[in-house]
Image (tube, rainbow, N blue to C red):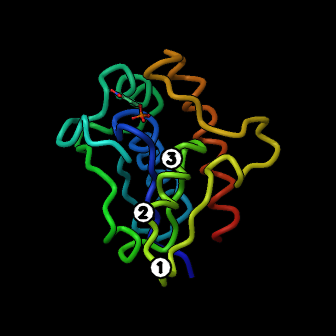
Amino acid sequence: MTHRILFVCLGNICRSPSAEGVLRAKAAARGLSLQIDSCGTGGWHVGEAPYGPMQQAANARGYDLSGLRARQLTGSDFDQFDLLIAMDADNLSNMKRLHPKGSQAQLALFTDFAPGCGADHVPDPYYTRDFDGTLDLIERCADALLDQLS
Ligand code: 4NP
């Protein structure tokens, strides 16, 4: 059974910490016990809290991201997690590059859990500035992921 889930984006200050906060809240609401974390393929923001405007948009929906700190994806994550979920195709190809031979971890694209969502990646609001649009999509994909797990 899949119960250790790692969300992966580029900087780990916008999309993946939001996915972590959203999935954690939605899993708790369903009474599901999951281990959830997030990280970035890049190291520029290691140690930082999620981006301020992202935190504000998440807070407005009841998700508190303030305690999260950015970290970079490592080889041991492929042992520590059953399912590593990318926000976009670049994240996924970087994850595949680091995926150790023999690792049982599954790699997936977040939007693939919600085929009807009309998107093939989670847009980066650090650049689009559409924090609410990104949260709408993350909530939809999180619901679809939980439907598959439960
Ligand atoms: P994220 O967004 O991958 O959703 O955390 C980014 C935020 C900052 C940068 C890249 C992506 N950056 O290069 O500073």
Disc 2, SS: helix
Tell me how many marks there are: 3
Disc 3, SS: helix
For label 2, the crowd category at 10 Å Cα-Cα, with few meaning under 14, some 14 to 19 and many 20 or more, is some
For label 3, the crowd category at 10 Å Cα-Cα, with few meaning under 14, some 14 to 19 and many 20 or more, is some
Image: 56 above or below 4: above
Q: Amino acid at mark 1?
A: Lys
- For disc 3, the marked residue is 91
Nearest the viewer among 149 and 70 is 70
- For disc 1, the marked residue is 101
Q: Amino acid at mark 3?
A: Asn
Image quadrant holding the N terminus, namely bottom right
Image: 112 above or below 132: below
Q: Residue furthest right?
A: 116
Mark pair 3, 1: CA separation: 18 Å
Considering only order in the chain, which callout, 1 or 3, is on the residue closer to the N terminus?
Answer: 3
- For disc 2, the marked residue is 98
Q: Which mark is residue 145?
A: none
State the residue at coordinates (32%, 39%).
65
State the residue at coordinates (62%, 52%).
109
Image: 59 above or below 142: above
State the residue at coordinates (56%, 71%).
106
Left or right: 55 as drawn, with respect to 123: left
Note whether ligand 1 is within 8 Å of mark 3.
yes
Q: Where is residue 70 shown, x and y percent of the image?
A: 26, 44
Left or right: 61 as drawn, with respect to 123: left
Nearest the viewer among 12 and 117 is 12
Q: Amino acid at mark 2?
A: Leu
Disc 1, SS: loop
Q: Where is residue 11 shown, x and y percent of the image?
A: 35, 37
Q: Quadrant of residue 2?
A: bottom right
Q: Where is residue 49 shown, x and y percent of the image?
A: 23, 35
